[in-house]
Image (spheres, rainbow, N blue to C red):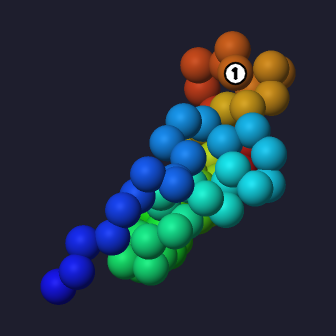
Amino acid sequence: MAVESRAHLYKDMPKNWDQLKNNIWLSDAGAYPVLVVLTFACGMSASYITYCCVKNPDVRITTGKRQQLIRTWE
């Protein structure tokens, strides 16, 4: 297996589109499944957190309901 030089790759935080395309993560095809799994996991966790905040009766987002000790709404 040949080892290719990665000297042309941009290793710092990319600041424009050309640097982003030459970034190490985007230049390696083996990193694409990792990026897909991370994107999927972050999306699923954000949707679950949103679902729990909206549907759970113990979560009180509005200030009127936040100070009540006994739930009078349902």
Residue 68 higher or lower than 60, as above or below = above
Q: Which residue is mark 1?
A: 66
* Along the line of sight, the residue nearer the viewer: 7 or 62: 7
Q: Position of residue 40 (x, y in %)?
A: 52, 71
Answer left or right for 47 relative to 15.
Answer: left
Residue 62 in which image quadrant: top right
Residue 21 higher or lower than 1, as above or below = above
Identify the residue shown where x is 68% and y is 54%: 20
* Along the line of sight, the residue nearer the viewer: 30 or 70: 30
Name the secondary structure under disc 1. helix
Q: Position of residue 14 (x, y in %)?
A: 66, 42
Residue 54 seen anywhere in this rendered image of the structure: no
Residue 26 seen anywhere in this rendered image of the structure: yes
Three-letter residue code for mark 1 = Arg
Identify the residue shown where x is 48% and y is 60%: 25
* Along the line of sight, the residue nearer the viewer: 34 or 1: 1
